[in-house]
Image (cartoon, rainbow, N blue to C red):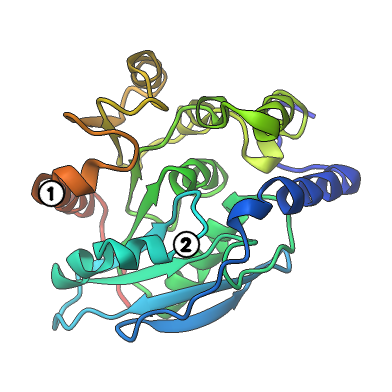
Amino acid sequence: MSRNDHSTSWLGAAVSKLFIRVMFRQVQGWKRDVPPRASAFIENAPDSSLLEGAVQHSCAVQPKGVVMLCHPFLKYGMHYFYENELDRAFVEQGYHVVAFNFKGFGRSSIGGHAFADDVLAIARRVSRDYPGLPIHLVGCSFGGYHLAHALARDHTPFTSAVLDSVPLSVRSYFTRGPLRLAMRWISGSRLAVPTGTCAIDQSLRGIRHLPIAYLHGLDDRFIPGSSVTKLQRECADLQVIGFEHCRHLENHKKHRDRYFAEIFAFFDRAQARKPLVSA
């Protein structure tokens, strides 16, 4: 198997699914209904996972597009965005918002072995439900990590992608206990590419003609300056934006106005580059 091969054997897939169930048990299975401002749905993914999601519609006469939110590695899953009211900011600016739980989180089941497949499954639903509208991705930490690997598989449905607080390697995030040992093993094995545990620069450097922004806190211990330098060297077209005095996932908390100003300006530039398809 080559390093760029996204397929894996049935045995490798079985091992990967078992790994997800056992090692991620601490953050998976927490359930909560979506807030009244959102409408819940279940998407049948091609890998047989049932993915829990929710959609909010902008009241704008002419919606600007759809924002897909990919959650961090927390038991709250997609509720991270509702608790921090990130969804409201996008809706108020004229975007429909779609959030979802990766496999194993919330009510999402584990049918396959690759989290990148979840991103593409929800993207297919969004493309079907909102034909012609630009689709922007926003992934925080874990969600952005697998968003990056999803782009390497198929970035054609998307207009832009924002990676917020995303470590370059899983080894930077999982630094203690059994998960550290497991991640070091799987990210260096033949399963690294199929499972999406390889470093994100391996996926991002092959992507062309898709605007990608990388947002990071300058005090994020999971994203040292050397990692950012390496990412910029490997991915020359990447737009890198740093936030002072921010640790992991603090960019929108400490610099909320600037955070959204940067994202919305980035969306506008991306949409200006990509011709729209008539609905």
Q: Quick check: can you spot residue 67?
A: no
The front one of 185 and 63 is 185
Using residue 207 as the reference point, say whether residue 184 is left or right of it.
right
The front one of 237 and 185 is 185
Secondary structure at badge 1 equals helix
Q: How packed is label 1: few (under 14 Cα within 10 Å), some, or many (20 or more)? A: few
Q: Which residue is mark 2?
A: 76
Kindly report which numbered mark, 2 or 1, lies closer to the viewer in this rendering: 2
Using residue 22 as the reference point, say whether residue 251 is left or right of it.
left
Question: Label 2, label 1: how many angstroms apart (C-alpha)?
Answer: 29 Å
181 vs 264: above or below: above
Residue at the location (62% across, 35% down)? 197
201 vs 80: above or below: above
Using residue 276 as the reference point, say whether residue 255 is left or right of it.
left
| Contact flag, marks 2 and 1 (Cβ < 8 Å) | no
Secondary structure at badge 2 equals loop
145 vs 156: above or below: above
Q: Quick check: can you spot residue 26?
A: yes
Residue at the location (60% across, 73% down)? 107
Q: Which residue is mark 1?
A: 265
* Residue found at the very far right of the displayed protein: 11
Counting residues from the start of the chain, the first of labels 2 and 1 encountered is: 2
